[in-house]
Structure formats: structure tokens, C-alpha cells
């Protein structure tokens, strides 16, 4: 039983380490995702001038596509199926390990990485 728990814990730790982002490197219009071991884990090619990199944390990087914010994983694929609107005065502020911050006038809104607004959340 102890051996099974140890193997499970090690496999979860090993899997978590490969899902992380150490840094993002831009080469022209290509976003390269570098993992904790210094090896490229994924990439994304910006489609046109309407797309740009907004920021990243250890799990996700954020793209702005026209008036939408997209959450991308460490492989360069879209993680959330729901985009966050940057229309009607919404502005991206920053990304933390727990949330995405969007400001609209004096109000600050917090979103999770699935694109859902978090209620009663402060960081």
C-alpha cells in the first residue's frame, strides 16, 4: 500500500513539473514556451497584427486576439474554450498564479483560467 502511494505521488510530481512554464521567448512572430528544464515545450505563431502576447505565469500564457483574451497552455494550444472580453472598456492588468485581472474604469474583475468571472475574490 505504501509503495502504491509513493508511486502515485512521484508520478503526480513528475507530471506537474512538465506542465510548467519557466519563460516565454519571442522569435519574430513565434512564441516559444520554455519549460523548467530549459527545453522548449511548445510554441504558437501569432496569426496577424491583431494578436499579441499579454503575459504568463507558471501554467498558462495569455494572448490578445482583437478584443478577446485567450488562455493558452504550455504546449501552445488554447486551454479555455471561453474567451474573456476586452471590449467596452475592459483592460488587461496582469496575470497571477491564481487569476487574471481585468479593469473596467474603477472596477477590478478577476477571472479564472477557464474564462469564468470569480465572485467575491480578492488577491
Image (spheres, rainbow, N blue to C red):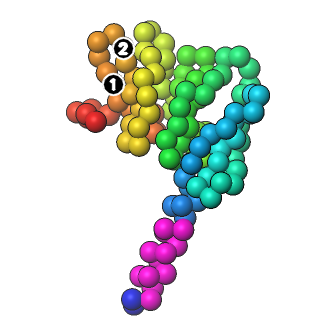
* Cα–Cα span, label 1 and label 2: 8 Å
83 to 12, vertically: above or below: above
- Drawn side of residue 109 relative to residue 37, left or right: left
Residue stretch rendered in magenta on the structure: 3-14
Residue at image position (69%, 54%) is 39
The residue wearing badge 2 is 104
Residue 109 disc label: 1
Residue 120 placement (x, y as % from top left): 22, 33
Q: Which quarter of the image is occupied by the C terminus?
A: top left
Residue 53 figure quarter? top right
Of residues 57 and 2, the one nearer the viewer is 57
26 to 90, vertically: above or below: below
Of residues 103 and 27, the one nearer the viewer is 27
The reply to whether residue 81 is visible in this rendering is no
Q: Secondary structure at mark 2?
A: strand
Of residues 13 and 78, the one nearer the viewer is 13
Amino acid at each position: 500500500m505504501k509503495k502504491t502511494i509513493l508511486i502515485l505521488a512521484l508520478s503526480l510530481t513528475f507530471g506537474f513539473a512538465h506542465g510548467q512554464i519557466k519563460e516565454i521567448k519571442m522569435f519574430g512572430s513565434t512564441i516559444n514556451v520554455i519549460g523548467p528544464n530549459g527545453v522548449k515545450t511548445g510554441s504558437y505563431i501569432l496569426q496577424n497584427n491583431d494578436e499579441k502576447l499579454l503575459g504568463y505565469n507558471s501554467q498558462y500564457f495569455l494572448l490578445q486576439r482583437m478584443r478577446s483574451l485567450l488562455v493558452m497552455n504550455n504546449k501552445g494550444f488554447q486551454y479555455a474554450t471561453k474567451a474573456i472580453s476586452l471590449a467596452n472598456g475592459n483592460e488587461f492588468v496582469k496575470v497571477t498564479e491564481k487569476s487574471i485581472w481585468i479593469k473596467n474604469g474603477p472596477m477590478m474583475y478577476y477571472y479564472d483560467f477557464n474564462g469564468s468571472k470569480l465572485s467575491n475574490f480578492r488577491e
